């Protein structure tokens, strides 16, 4: 099937602009993170040339495989991260969206101390309590942030969630609202090593609702590149 990345992006731009306005913000307040998992480098390059300078991947191996071929982009790790893979990406990614345990935070901080850098991270929250998903429970999110904030080589930049897939995106509004509340609550604690700026929520199916409720990073794959082909 032929997919025009340019047409897809201009459609998303319109919707993002409108949703940002509805929440009293501007399009430029929102980061469109292009999720390039399973997409080949030539197609990703098209998106980069059309302005997508920040890319999200959910597997460490895929970032490593594409890294040298796409110079000048900012990489975000958005998928579950195993502690034994942290060492491969500390020098490659700008933001890790998926920190959901103290153990993982400790490993990131340790590896970053050795590399002489501080890693920006988001704490992933499993807001709907889906068993199949990673993320800390909303009840334990604040406690985890407090524990993570003792680590010198990470900086907690906000929260991330993957909402359930729902054909009616409006049904996810409740989770996005709860995320915003949790975000404000944690921000008010003024923990050390914490600079609450980002709320990463909303994907192809529900990003407009997420932005209306306060998301400032939306992670969009299918909406830009078309349906993923996992058979390759
Ligand atoms: C794949 C993925 C996305 C993008 O999903 P689409 O529905 O294709 O936009 C966003 N976030 C995470 C964590 C993902 O794994």
Image (tube, rainbow, N blue to C red):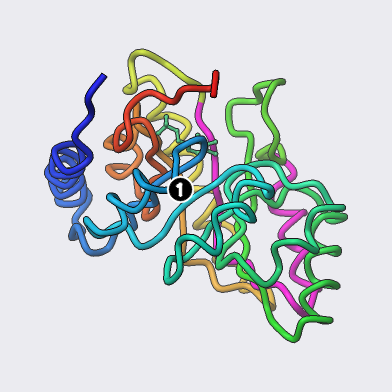
Image coords of residue 40 (percent x, y): 45, 41
Q: Quadrant of residue 174?
A: top left
- The answer to whether 39 appears left or right of 136 in the picture is left
Local SS, label 1: helix
Q: Tell which of 228 and 154 is nearer to you.
A: 228
**Crowd rating for badge 1 (residues with CA inside 10 Å; few <14, some 14–19, many 20+):** some
Q: Tell which of 2 and 56 is nearer to you.
A: 2
- The answer to whether 159 appears left or right of 111 in the picture is left
Q: Which residues are magenta?
A: 139-163
Q: Quadrant of residue 55?
A: bottom left
Image quadrant containing the N terminus: top left
- The answer to whether 105 appears left or right of 16 in the picture is right
Query: Disc 1 designates what residue?
Result: 180
Image quadrant containing the C terminus: top right
At horizontal 64% and vertical 56% (from top left) the residue drawn is 64
- Looking at this rendering, what residue extends furthest in the bottom direction? 116
At horizontal 73% and vertical 47% (from top left) the residue drawn is 81
């Amino acid at each position: 099937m032929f997919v025009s990345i340019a047409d897809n992006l201009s459609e998303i731009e319109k919707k993002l602009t409108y949703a940002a306005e509805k929440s009293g913000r501007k399009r430029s307040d929102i980061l469109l993170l292009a999720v390039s998992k399973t997409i080949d480098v030539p197609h990703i390059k098209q998106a980069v040339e059309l302005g997508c300078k920040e890319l999200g991947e959910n597997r460490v191996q895929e970032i490593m495989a594409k890294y040298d071929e796409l110079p000048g982009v900012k990489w975000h790790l958005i998928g579950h991260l195993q502690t034994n893979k942290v060492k491969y990406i500390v020098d490659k990614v700008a933001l890790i969206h998926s920190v959901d345990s103290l153990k993982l935070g400790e490993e990131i901080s340790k590896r970053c101390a050795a590399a002489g850098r501080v890693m920006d991270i988001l704490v992933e929250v499993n807001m709907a309590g889906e068993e199949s998903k990673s993320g800390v429970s909303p009840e334990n999110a604040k406690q985890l942030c407090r524990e993570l904030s003792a680590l010198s080589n990470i900086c907690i930049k906000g929260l991330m969630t993957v909402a359930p897939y729902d054909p009616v995106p409006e049904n996810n509004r409740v989770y996005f609202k709860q995320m915003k509340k949790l975000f404000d609550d944690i921000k008010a604690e003024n923990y050390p090593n914490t600079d609450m700026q980002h709320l990463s929520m909303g994907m192809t199916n529900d990003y407009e609702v997420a932005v209306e409720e306060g998301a400032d990073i939306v992670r969009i794959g299918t909406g830009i590149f078309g349906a993923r082909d996992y058979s390759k």
